[in-house]
Amino acid sequence: MIDAERLKILTESAKYDVSCSSSGSARANKKGGVGNASPAGICHSFTPDGRCISLLKILLSNRCAYNCLYCPNRADADVPRACATPDEICQLTIAFYRRNYIEGLFLSSAVDGSPDATMERMLETVIRLRKVYNFNGYIHLKGIPRADRLLTSRAARYVDRMSYNVELPSEASLRLLAPQKSKESVLLPMKQLALEKRADAEDKGKRRRTFLPAGQTTQMIVGASPETDGRILRLSEAMYRKFSLKRVYYSSYVPVVRHALLPEKCTGLLREHRLYQADWLLRFYGFTAEEIAGEGENLPEDCDPKCAWALKNMHLFPVEINRAPLEMLLRVPGIGSLGAYRILQARRYAVLGFADLAKMRVVLKRAKHFITCDGKFYGSENPTTVRTMLRLEDGAAKYEQLSMFSSPEVSLSALTGQL
């Protein structure tokens, strides 16, 4: 069994990777095995800074041959080093699962030796965990860039989710801050996995889909390099479209190591929060990256991206709630995706008024400036006044971790992500 000192080093080294959500798989338990990765079997707990702790999050090794300047495990960093064997990771995972500490495993590694050698040890770990230890729970594997594509493909048949972290949004920034990495070394394996998953889904002879049932994710560090939010969102949009990613995670830069080429201050959580809001608009509201922010623009700090878009396009409003199409309802500030579908259903049977919208949990403080109900308008017609009121309201909002004891309105908004 792994000793306490190595366990501390390897888990501490893994905490900066946030692309480890544990939902989306339907891997069921088998007779004689332990663990279940069905949606109801995965619980979610979060630390105050938003990181998931429902998984055992650990590195196989933090002895890195690469020298990424922003990474605390880079080759020339003066930090304690440790590694674990595949059996030690397997034993630890089973022991923690049986104690109900975890619901699954997030396994990553520094490039210890060569990419192929590291990926081979990670592959051995997940195979032993599945076949020798009969673990049927959730496994998320962090892929190693530049490893042989056959190793990547084989690993994808044993795990639920894989991630290759883009980390920096441009080739120029990678050359400057992570010289051993390239955009191609990350995007090519992501493309390979997307194509193989598509082929697996189209194979009509298969009854059970075992190739990456929970798909792929990636992570970008925000603020370590000079790229704007518009540039970041364009890259996210392209990856969602080309690789069918489940999520792009945005991690605010924190100066855990010092270097002349890196910023001295933290980026701050507000910029990260705005990017997640914009990402939600890309995935669920029909917006494009171009609509949300120009390539050279950052998202505004004083209002959310949906309000910012609406303020730029006041000529499109107000819209009549009883006649507006779904795609327009989704663009009204204060009307979330659930609210829009409820409006479509309800107006089939009656003419809706503002009181009806309030019952549907539409945020009328925002929406009233952009809608009419049966011809009635209760907002302001002055664009400057609307802008001021929306920014004041957004500035008064508190962006905090969802609590079990939050009010129902806050809980619903946080759970559904409505904007």
Image (spheres, rainbow, N blue to C red):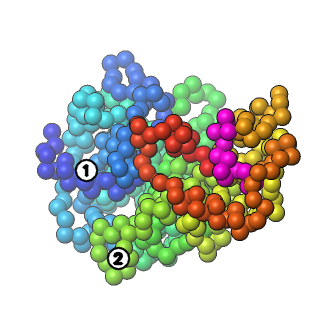
Number of marks: 2
Q: Is residue 364 above or below residue 392?
A: above
Q: Is residue 18 above or below residue 90?
A: below
Q: Position of residue 220 (x, y in %)?
A: 47, 61
- Amino acid type of the residue tagged 1 in the rendering: Thr
Q: Earlier in the sequence, mark 1 or mark 2?
A: 1
Whether tag 1 and tag 2 are in contact, CB under 8 A, the answer is no
Q: Residue at x 66, y 53 (%)?
A: 366
Q: Residue at x 19, y 65 (%)?
A: 79
Look at discs 1 and 2 and give the one toward the viewer. Answer: 2
Which quarter of the picture shows residue 387? bottom right
Q: Callout 2: few (<14), some (14-19), or many (20+) C-alpha neighbours within 10 Å?
A: some
Q: Is residue 117 above or below residue 407?
A: below
Judge by depth and name the residue closer to the eye, 419 or 279: 419
Q: Label 1 to label 2, Cα distance in Å?
A: 25 Å
Question: For numbered disc 2, what is the local secondary structure?
Answer: loop
Q: Position of residue 170 (x, y in %)?
A: 52, 71
Left or right of 405? Residue 110 is left
Left or right of 87? Residue 46 is right
Give the residue number, with chain letter if any, for mark 1: 11
- Amino acid type of the residue tagged 2 in the rendering: Glu
- Range of the magenta residues? 358-370
Judge by depth and name the residue closer to the eye, 74 or 101: 101
Residue furthest top in the image: 31
Q: Callout 1: few (<14), some (14-19), or many (20+) C-alpha neighbours within 10 Å?
A: some
Q: Which mark is residue 264?
A: 2
Q: Residue at x 53, y 73 (%)?
A: 227
Left or right of 388? Residue 349 is right
Q: Is residue 228 in view from this perspective?
A: yes
